[in-house]
Image (cartoon, rainbow, N blue to C red):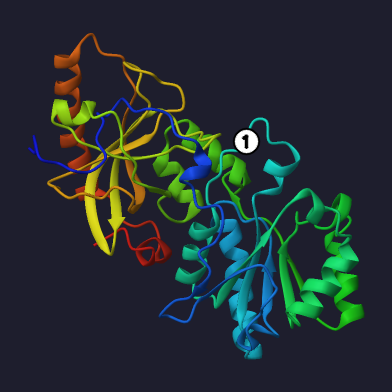
Amino acid sequence: MLQHGIRIAASNLSCLATHPVSCHIAITLKAGTNLSGFIRLAGLDQVPASLRGAMVAIGNFDGCHRGHQHVFRALKARAAALGVPALVLTFEPHPRDVFAPAPFMFRLTYADQKAEVAEALGLDGIVVMPFSLEFSHIVAEDFVTRFLVGALGVTGVSVGADFHFGYKRQGTPDFLRDAGVRHGFEVEILDMLDEGDDHISSSRIRALLGEGDVAGAAQLLGYHWFLSGVVVKGDQRGRELGFPTANTASPTGFGLLQGVYAVRAKLNGRLLDGVASYGKPMFNNERPPFETWIFDFDEDIYGETLEVALLGTVRGQVKFAGLDELIAAVNNDAAQARLLLQSTLPVSELDEKLGFFR
């Protein structure tokens, strides 16, 4: 067990000072083209010629869950049949957080996470449109002519049956079908997918994560939920107790159940096993960070971006009688987390492609 010399952001598994979400959560997209050719665009001011004429899926796609993937796969198949690119068009911040930001919504995926899923599914690119009150006043017809026809020259559009767009949600599925006829592009409206007695939805997944049911959430997402953040310095309690943690700020509205989780992290192309804690009932528990104790690790990673996938739930948070009881519990948590990490398998091909499994 590592005791000293750890230079990652350190606080123990139930402590850290507060950090504003906006400083550490990537809401805006890291634009550009990667080695695979996947293109990320922040807005439509400069659209590469290679993306014009695309089939485009439009939506908020928070979580990029199996229902959204149903849209993406249909889009990809149709694009392949027509010999055109397959593109996702989404919005940041989420419109809900623009219109009613109190409280902020528990977000499942921000721009870069959406891009990772879209790329893993074999799409050609993603456009993230900056959403604001001003943007929300664009009427549906203008959205079609300016962005879909003018900027992208779309061959076709795919949306879910519940999708609306434009000022006062004037852009209904029926409106979009009519617009396609007027402007000469295909429109495909896809029904929502069911799991059990209900639709697969972002709100249903948020509820599962709010109960600490990461396995249930993974079944609806089609992959193990992961989050990303910049490692920041904590108050060093973990270093003193022998459990140094890499701390990332929890976003405003973060709705994960406070508890302990078996996790696998990605750092600069490496996979690192660990146990993570959200919540610090023995200390200041106001907007706690997400704290990851990476096993067998001794590196300075302040300022680095850490992606962490939740592969299993160890327990909920407990307020212990003293530090000795806390230390014993954390050692037991680590042992349980190692067992969960050894036994947990990908839930889908997408889960494998996202890169959290060896």
Q: Based on the displayed image, in which of its 4 quarters is residue 106 positioned?
A: top right
- Can the viewer see residue 90? yes
Q: Based on the displayed image, in which of its 4 quarters is residue 56 positioned?
A: bottom right
Locate residue 309, reporting x and y percent. Answer: 36, 49
Q: Secondary structure at mark 1?
A: loop
Query: Farthest top residue?
Result: 321
Q: Looking at this view, is 32 or 140 the one in front? A: 32
Name the amino acid type tagged 1.
Phe
Locate residue 10, reporting x and y percent. Answer: 24, 35
Residue 235 vs 323, above or below: the answer is below
Residue 328 vs 73, above or below: the answer is above
Locate residue 267, reporting x and y percent. Answer: 28, 57
- Can the viewer see residue 186? no
Q: Residue at x 32, y 53 (%)?
A: 304
Q: Based on the displayed image, in which of its 4 quarters is residue 348 positioned?
A: bottom left
Q: Looking at this view, is 219 or 302 the one in front? A: 302
Q: Quadrant of the C terminus?
A: bottom left
Q: Which residue is mark 1?
A: 104
Query: Farthest bottom residue?
Result: 83
Instruction: Report whether 251 appears left or right of 82.
Output: left
Q: Residues within 10 Å of mark 1 (few under 14, many from 20)?
A: some
Locate residue 282, reporting x and y percent. Answer: 31, 15
Q: Residue at x 45, y 69 (%)?
A: 120
Numbered disc total: 1
Q: Looking at this view, is 352 or 97 the one in front? A: 97
Q: Quadrant of the N terminus?
A: top left
Instruction: Report whether 345 appears left or right of 207.
Output: left
Q: Residue at x 74, y 83 (%)?
A: 155
Instruction: Report whether 104 appears left or right of 330.
Output: right
